[in-house]
Image (tube, rainbow, N blue to C red):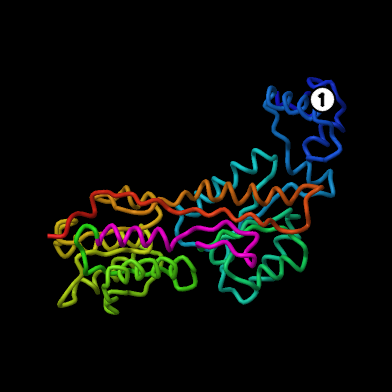
Amino acid sequence: MKVTINDVARQAGVSIKTVSRVMNNEPSVRKDTYDKVMAAINELQYQPNAAARNLASSRSFSIGYIYDNPNAYYVIDMQRGMLDACRKHGYELIIHPTNAKSAGIVQEVLDLVQHSRLAGLVLTPPFSEMPEIAQALEKIGLPFIRIISGSTPSPKLSNCVLVDDFTAAFKITNHLLELGHTEIAFLCGDDEHSSSGERLAGYQAALAKRGIATNPKFIVPGSYSFESGVKGAEKLLQLSKRPTAIFACNDEIAAGALFSARLMNIAIPQQLAIAGFENSPFSRQTWPPLTTAHQPNVTIAQQAAELLFRHTKPNASKNLPDKQPVFIPELLVRESTAVSS
């Protein structure tokens, strides 16, 4: 039978109201009482029903995640991380896919908050990079955490988890340079994502440090998709002086580039080195497997949700957090890169 709050109260030797106060993280609960209740919860493996708590309380036990991202693996990892944190704190996760370019997107987000009685929101790109959404949420006093591309904490970005795309892209490009490649091309992602610009800047900085001028023909605009990688690589590989290495803005683009090179009978990595970014399943499903940067999206999402929960408790400060965790994706060298011949 399903464990109920009554079972927890009986096991801990306290009232149901006391269990409820512990579950709501109310500051007036004594430590010894809190410990007894938590021990009973853990022993009985009690899982509170967030929907019932929402109905019975003026306080919400649901947070939201809105997204507009073509990379299904990224979205799934974000959901996994947030759900892990929600289960730990007894919250539900409301997932809302939508179109970031919609003219009424701000009102749509506000309607979601109201209709779903959300306690807070986790925003990922491109929503986390849209100031109009942040301003609207601040106006109604709703806690939110943004996951954004950036390397330097700033007072202007106090409610953020940062992903240092610049440093990771610098390391990938430097890896290709150390292998002897000097003709390195870059396949861009969507312009509206700050990660695209940060990764491009990291690539350019690594070249500049070696005194290598950026070749405009080697920078190809695109989007975060397999098809974009196919078309971008095709364009590069038809140049009279083609690159010896391609750095793609994510693994999906890199997989598309590898596919395009295969169609042109170009050997990877003997004739062309290819690197991606994020360490998504695309990087492991190709042959050869792709050199990439491991971006721990599940952990990033967990951290973002944990920061949000610090501000959904009754005794939480109304000010958003000053802490800004910074994640630097880690270089993973695989068979798709090799010494330039």
Residue type at tag 1: Ala
Picture coordinates of residue 334, whole percent (x, y): 27, 49
> Which span of residues is magenta-colored?
151-177
User: In the drawing, does residue 201 fall left or right of residue 269?
Assistant: right
- Count of marks, rendered view: 1
Pointer 1: residues within 10 angstroms few (<14), some, or many (20+)? many
Q: Is residue 176 shown in magenta?
A: yes
Q: Residue at x 31, y 62 (%)?
A: 173
Vertical placement of residue 23 versus 213, above or below: above
Residue 219 placement (x, y as % from top left)? 31, 74
- Quarter location, residue 227: bottom left
In the rendered image, residue 191 lying in the magenta stretch gets the answer no
- Give the residue furthest to the bottom: 216
- Where residue 261 sits, quadrant-wise, is bottom left
Give the residue drawn at x 64%, y 67%. Answer: 156
**Is residue 145 toward the left or the right of residue 249 in the image?**
right
Specify the quadrant that holds the C terminus.
Answer: bottom left
Q: Image quarter for residue 36?
A: top right
Task: Give the residue drawn at x 14%, y 62%.
Answer: 265
Where does the image place residue 132, in percent across and percent down from the top left?
A: 65, 73
Of residue 334 and residue 323, the one placed in the foreground of this image is: 323
Compared across the picture, whether 203 is left or right of 40 comes to: left
| Secondary element at image label 1 | helix
Where is the N terminus found, in terms of image quarters? Answer: top right
Q: Does residue 293 appear left or right of residue 273 in this picture? A: right
Please provide percent x and percent y for residue 28. Answer: 86, 38
Residue extending farthest to the left is: 341
Seen from the viewer's position, the closer of residues 317 and 262 is 317
Query: Where is mark 1, residue-wise?
Result: 9
